[in-house]
Image: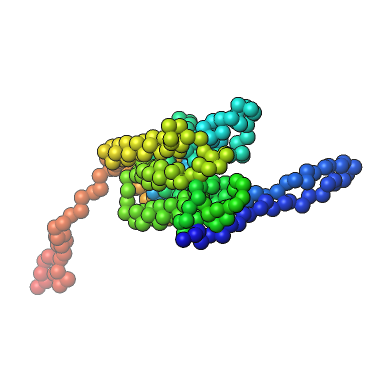
Amino acid sequence: MSGLIPWFRLEAIPIPLPEHLELFGFRASFPQDWSIQPFGLLVATGVMLGASLAERRAKAVGVHPNAVASCVAHVLIGGFVIGHVFDALAYHPDVVREDPLFLLKVWDGLSSFGGFLGAVLGLMLYLQRFGADARVVGDPIAWAFPLGWMFGRTGCFVVHDHPGAPTDFFLGVRDYQVGPPPYVTRHDMGLYEILWSAAVMGLFVYLAKTPRKRGFYLGLLPILYAPIRFGLDFLRATDLEYGDARYFGLTPGHYSAIVLLAAGVLFLRWVQSSPEPEVPESIRYVPEDEERARAEAARKVEAVELADEAAKSAPSAEAEGDAPLPEVATGEAKPAETKSSDARPKGKKKR
């Protein structure tokens, strides 16, 4: 069976700019070769969607989204820079020897494993600067990673920059236009990692229905990726002039997958056996309704404390020297003796 996917390639979209523009007596010239690359557009989309999903996940687990956004920035910078350097040194050493400045062209080629290494270094730098725990800020990013990775690998697929070996697999791309003709059906590594990303994203959404220890997804992600990547690297093209370099029959990706798998297993075991870290107050997220309830409760407690202090400081009646109240007679008053109305004064009787 031949591949079911026909050959296609998304070309760059040119940006129409005027050659010159005069404004207030100044004349500016614009380059005429600017364009929007489909790969870059899809990677940027993946970064934005992945970061947004990571921030939403952070809120759900009680971490402030601003802390995760800052961590994402560190991770991305490290990932892109180290990803390119690793790709240049491991896969294109001859290009580096001819042009050492190629190491600085971070837009020209990326390695996924180099990107992972750079992401870890960026995460460590963030932790050192802000004193947070990797499990607290890294876990929401790892949970959202498959979504961003899916868009990134879609960029690889639409420009077909990861050709594989010839095949008759039904997911192969027919007439893969790489190398000299005649063109044949080949594996496309980007397509297979799109499918992996979609499957893992669905798995993570399902697993998120049950509370997990912080760091669970940060350890599970490399465990799920490394074996798949190890297997896919056997499908890389070996009949092309610029095929991936091999050392003792294996690609740099093979060796990196072994290291990544071991690191993921050790990290996940440590997560499961260690106490769960607390979220620092500085990066803790409290929903607005809960925050209002806490503020109201705090105001009530403060009011009660003020009332207690006022009662304790009020002077007593005896301390003020007030005279005691007169006693109130409780017995019945004796009626005053009165003379009878018909009584006559004593005197001599008249005869």
Q: Is residue 237 left or right of residue 263?
A: right
In the foreground, 176 or 92: 176
- Residue at point 34%, 54% (across, down): 207
In the foreground, 289 or 67: 67
Quadrant including the C terminus = bottom left
Up-down relation of residue 302 to residue 119 (above or below): below
Asked if residue 265 shows in the view, the reply is yes
**Image location (x, y in percent) of residue 170:** 46, 59
In the foreground, 142 or 97: 97
Q: Is residue 267 left or right of residue 128?
A: left
- Residue at point 50%, 59% (across, down): 3
Q: In which quarter of the image is residue 277?
A: top left
**Image location (x, y in percent) of residue 347:** 12, 65
* Coloration mode: rainbow
Up-down relation of residue 76 to residue 174 (above or below): above
In the foreground, 333 or 70: 70
**Image location (x, y in percent) of residue 150:** 49, 51
**Image location (x, y in percent) of residue 248:** 43, 32
Residue that lies at the very extreme toward the right in this rendered image: 25
